[in-house]
Image (cartoon, coloured by chain):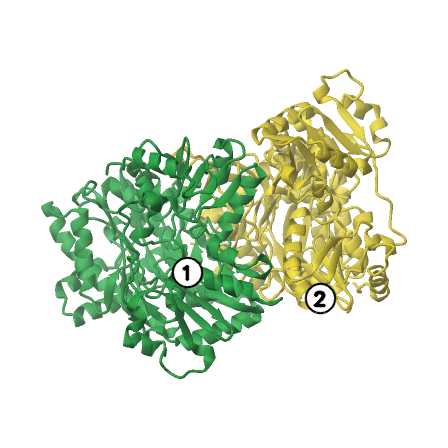
Chain colours: A green, B yellow
Amino acid sequence: MSPKITTELLKQLRQVMKNPKYVQEPVQAYIVPSGDAHQSEYIAPCDCRRAFISGFDGSAGTAIITEQHAAMWTDGRYFLQAEHQMDNNWTLMKMGLKDTPTQEDWLVSVLPEGSKVGVDPFIIPADQWKRMSKVLRSAGHDLVPVKENLIDTIWTDCPQRPCKPLIILDLSYTGVSWRDKIVALRSKMAERKVMWFVVTALDEVAWLFNLRGSDVEYNPVFFAYAVIGMNTIRLFIDGDRMMDPAVREHLQLDSTLEPEFKIQVMPYGSILSELQAVGAGLSPKEKVWLSDKASYALTEAIPKAYRYLTPYTPICIAKAVKNASETEGMRRAHIKDAVALCELFNWLEKEVPKGTVTEIIAADKAEEFRSQQKDFVELSFATISSTGPNGAIIHYKPVPETNRTLSVNEIYLLDSGAQYKDGTTDVTRTMHFGTPSAYEKECFTYVLKGHIAVSAAIFPNGTKGHLLDSFARSALWDCGLDYLHGTGHGVGSFLNVHEGPCGISYKTFADEPLEAGMIVSDEPGYYEDGSFGIRIENVVLVIPAETKYNFKNRGSLTFEPLTLVPIQTKMIDVNLLTQKECNWVNDYHQKCREVVGAELERQGRHEALRWLIRETEPLVQVQ
Amino acid sequence: MSPKITTELLKQLRQVMKNPKYVQEPVQAYIVPSGDAHQSEYIAPCDCRRAFISGFDGSAGTAIITEQHAAMWTDGRYFLQAEHQMDNNWTLMKMGLKDTPTQEDWLVSVLPEGSKVGVDPFIIPADQWKRMSKVLRSAGHDLVPVKENLIDTIWTDCPQRPCKPLIILDLSYTGVSWRDKIVALRSKMAERKVMWFVVTALDEVAWLFNLRGSDVEYNPVFFAYAVIGMNTIRLFIDGDRMMDPAVREHLQLDSTLEPEFKIQVMPYGSILSELQAVGAGLSPKEKVWLSDKASYALTEAIPKAYRYLTPYTPICIAKAVKNASETEGMRRAHIKDAVALCELFNWLEKEVPKGTVTEIIAADKAEEFRSQQKDFVELSFATISSTGPNGAIIHYKPVPETNRTLSVNEIYLLDSGAQYKDGTTDVTRTMHFGTPSAYEKECFTYVLKGHIAVSAAIFPNGTKGHLLDSFARSALWDCGLDYLHGTGHGVGSFLNVHEGPCGISYKTFADEPLEAGMIVSDEPGYYEDGSFGIRIENVVLVIPAETKYNFKNRGSLTFEPLTLVPIQTKMIDVNLLTQKECNWVNDYHQKCREVVGAELERQGRHEALRWLIRETEPLVQVQ
């Protein structure tokens, strides 16, 4: 992977930063955040502005360009990748390390007196605007909205914004009709005494209307906004997509409906002016509910006194708690996904020793096996197929320049997942196709102990996920090992593979409490720079637990693994496991064998079935 | 404990809330926070306004009085106590429970349109003012400062503000002179480019000048403020205290000093006008550093653009990391404290069966034994001496109305500590003087497992304490038990028994990372309302740990118990302990026996020594 040469681009950008055609006054710094106008984590090619200007294309990062400097903030998952992808024009700011300044503090330290810092008001979330602008102002600088995106002005071959057909999800998948979702939403709005709710996140629009799209790779969403009033529904969406008779039927666009369920379809680009009109027409006490992560531009459309901002929207919270139809769909999806991975690992075991399987070939093969499964739509994220030292690059994606050949001498880490119409998967397995070293087994076993500690944890109703994070680290910590990422994220139901408002991470605090029906990942790891990476990831469902005393009727929760793929026993140092942990592994493998075995049998995949049976032999502890 | 009858007081308060003599415009609600003008947790009698108006005298709670309602917010430690102490005029708002509204939300729900909410601007912290005033304003109400404290206007027999002599701490106790502390502070100020620092917390003033006082019971502090400039030091303090030649000598008030170390002594009451003068004289870029918890009144004295607010001040952070002299002092104090408790428990064992020992007698006896130790100053908090159901009242303090007699049939919980000139102690032991039930032993053992899990935890440098909180709960959670308080708090060095910026609590997030030299408590518990309370508390020192891989040289930390008092083995169900836990208990008891045993021997306390030796017999696990 050679870095992108950005000298010329930065020169151009610094010119437009002073060009009165684009800026009212010259800006001394320009911020290029990661997201799009919906603050999406995964973005369409036309929105990859930060990658365009810097070369760094990880999923998280913010670039800031001043006259003298170009700096990139990203987190532990991406330190190595960013270092590889960026040229010498760039300084890497390692977030999470003690001495790394915040973006605001850094700006204050480098800017000349009375500077203007520009940013696209549609891209920057309102909460971030507020925080930055406060710090900058108190240091005598100004954060200013620059209407025209300055990257777009120099990005001559910027791709078109996608506008693909929609997928309709019927009740058997969603469990609840969009009408009932609107009713539930309005009741939440009434509770909070708000008259309007603005849906800005793409997955929230998709979930609300029981529609999916493919405008953004890996995330089955489509570019749209919605504004829900107590008696009106406005959907802002472009293209011919609303001409599709099935979509019209699904949304009942041509039916005579009660007016409060009549959807007004409007152009995507008209959201700002429509919202400004809503804002201008508000009577006192009429509040408008927005996510505090909605863009500064949309937030400003509502006069301050009328805004009701929350970190998590009612849709975000409702979406996180999966109903029975969604849970059943997720179970089905995970069984099919396990079938594909059993096929893959069986195939790898035979092919790797031949020295012909590269990371890219393995990733493609995984996709091939998945695509054979019913209701497969696409992958849920770029497959992390990494062997040896590449495994230590936490969110690595193999490209020809880095593509290593799998061998019997190196650890192989595969973090992959798919979108099926009935659910979203995300699973990581770490394998050795030869003989792992004692140290590799030791590290793997600590990671496994952490995985089990979370998966088997019992905790009272109302517990926030971040409180479980250290359970995943305890065994590693005891030996002086750690990993620089969170332990888990929320997972959507045929939606984004990362979703709020719950998760398991030491980095967050404002997560919503875990409740039965929520789905998160459990993925501790260990990474040895330049050498190997280990991660064990299951998607797990929050379920009620049985406990002796049941928290004075507050209720007990635990997790049920939805992922049912064997954990390579060859990598486990059984002597480091407690009896309880050993039983957990054996019970888990027993369930994989029963549930996935039955499906492999049904699909006539006998060789993979034999592989599964061998890989799920119980561990035996020598006392 | 019968509740305080507040009908008449509330009537009077509601009258002054409309009386133009005290308020510019009538206020429809009046907030009575817990603290004093220094946001102290422990307060002088003259500052106990919330207790005066409500009867509830726990250490945490905020009262809000409207025309129709009187409501009290407090946390899980105090639910039972508040219910007992308040009459029917009051509604208890149980903080931490899901359905309990915040103070702001509750105000919005009960107030008539366009209300004024009054509060004493010297008592409310600036951060809280900001949060409340924002919510109130957005609902059409106003938070207004009421200069005259309205409680004081109806509190006819309010006691005088105390003004006791000062105690000088020499270098052998503090390790660092006040001059060197000022130098270090100014260097932190220079780093942040601030010109002034306002010391508002009483323990920060005391620490900075190496002085102690006794204006507030249990906390060796004195009423004072300080304003530190890059070349000036102003100390705001009342009374004859500055006439004491020893104090004058210590502060070098009469010496010819470099001007930047010359202390200007000013009246306590002049802080606001002096700070306003500072605020008025600032040139651009001259910032003033204040805690964001400083009072609204003092914060407002500095124009907004010149304020530099942080949650933790540089003094708070420096004070938390104890130097070698302080650590050695803390060790000595804890040995002496253990001697006193060995005497007490030995005495209790003989006396309790006679049925003559009440909670108050036991508490007094504990104080008596402590007061026999060298450099004893006073208790560090009101002794929690509680038996049977009183043990479930987490911050119980025995009073004649509630005073139970200790017996061989009930669990006894003693949470107590003292101020010695060399250190502050805080220890909880839970004992049974007869035969505990299997259930009591089961609960005790889970609490012990949690205590050990924290105490023996190994974690990387830079870990925040709140991430360790669930270690203390895991064993309880497995059986469906929990406790509604944090696991640990910072402890001062002959200073406040509760201090920031570190702690171990699921409730906090903005705590500073633990580092070697910090001192916190480790005190999980379990409480069965109406029946018993269990808590096991040690004060522990953060120390470097030895680990196999040492976190890639980031460094490893763990805890060393400073408290060395036997944990009653009679209460332990050994079968529930792992071998590792069992070894921890035996090692701990071995250390108690060696270290405290030697001191008991030295002090000729042979009977208590025999008790210690018996109580520290190793546990034996039946395999």
Taking the image as drawn, is residue A353 in sight?
yes
Name the residue: 66% across, 67% down: B109
Q: Is residue A160 above or below residue B178?
A: below
In the image, residue B335 sits, relative to residue A219, either above or below, namely above
Residue furthest out toward the top: B256
Name the amino acid, label 1.
Answer: Ala
Query: What residue did someone put label 1 on?
Result: A201
- Give SS at disc 1: loop
Tell me where residue B314 sits by quadrant.
Answer: top right
Picture quarter with the N terminus of chain B = bottom right
Residue at figure coordinates x 40%, y 32% from the top left? A69
- When asked about the image quadrant of residue A241, the answer is bottom left
Instruction: Estimate the spatial distance between the alpha carbons at disc 2 and disc 1, rounded to whole Å.
Output: 35 Å
In the rendered view, would you say A226 is above or below B396? below
Q: Are marks 2 and 1 on the same chain?
A: no
Specify the subunit that label 2 lies on.
Answer: B
> Where residue B492 appears, x then y in whole percent?
65, 38
Q: Amino acid at mark 2?
A: Leu
> Label 1 near label 2: C-beta < 8 Å?
no
Would you say residue B75 is visible in this rendering?
no
User: Could you tell whether A414 is left or right of B61 in the image?
Assistant: left
